[in-house]
Image (cartoon, rainbow, N blue to C red):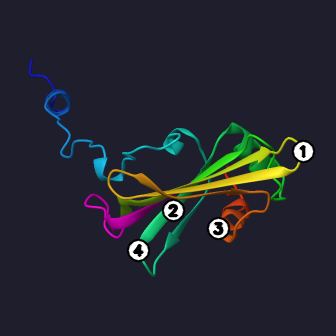
Amino acid sequence: MRPPITLYLFATVLSLSIIGCASHEPRISATVNRNASLVGDLPANPLQWKVVTSAINTEDSTMSTLYGNDVAVGYARSISQHNYPSGSILSLVTWTQRDDDRWFGAAIPDQVKSVEFVSVGVTPDGRPLYSYQEYEGNPLKRVTSQEGGTPTDRTAYLLSQRAAVMP
């Protein structure tokens, strides 16, 4: 007795499926974007913090992400005011952009353009104290450092950024 043709068809499809799975190799291997890494003498690594918000500047082809430590992120996500509590640290990392080789039309971070830090503290008499530092170059080196009881324009700008709404 001869087996039905459906049995041959089933066996062939099953064999091809097994062979196809066993010989499958990824066509594109995953890589780390080392150009976007932060290298230099920074007070902290903001890439290990949580994201507050992000932006793209199409005029100068840059992308920025505002990160915050736990104190700053907790405040930014729950209160819409800009009076960050003592212990808050925000950091804006700005990269130049480049085209993504793996996704048509997409852009990804390339070289680090600058890293800015804003720290909020308290003076001995209880008034707010704001510290601003900016780092540039490769490796990153501090180019600006300011501290005072009144936020500078740039410090005020960074403190005024609203947290992105995340699901």
User: Looking at the picture, which amino acid does disc 4 mark?
Assistant: Ser
Q: CA distance from mark 4 to mark 3?
A: 20 Å
Query: Which numbered mark, 4 or 3, is in the foreground of this view?
Result: 3
Q: Secondary structure at mark 1?
A: loop
Residue 127 highlighted magenta (yes or no): no
**Stretch in magenta:** 92-106
Query: Which numbered mark, 3 or 1, is in the foreground of this view?
Result: 1
Residue at 26% from the left image edge and 43% from the top image edge:
31
Decide which of 155, 57 is in the foreground and name it.
155
The label number, if any, that marks residue 61 in the structure image: 4
Q: CA distance from mark 3 to mark 2?
A: 15 Å
Q: Mark 3 vs mark 1: which is more N-terminal?
A: 1
In this picture, residue 4 sits left or right of residue 131: left
Picture layout, residue 152 above or below residue 76: below
User: Looking at the picture, which amino acid does disc 1 mark?
Assistant: Gly
Q: Mark 1 vs mark 2: which is more N-terminal?
A: 2
Decide which of 49, 14 is in the foreground and name it.
49
Query: Which numbered mark, 3 or 2, is in the foreground of this view?
Result: 3
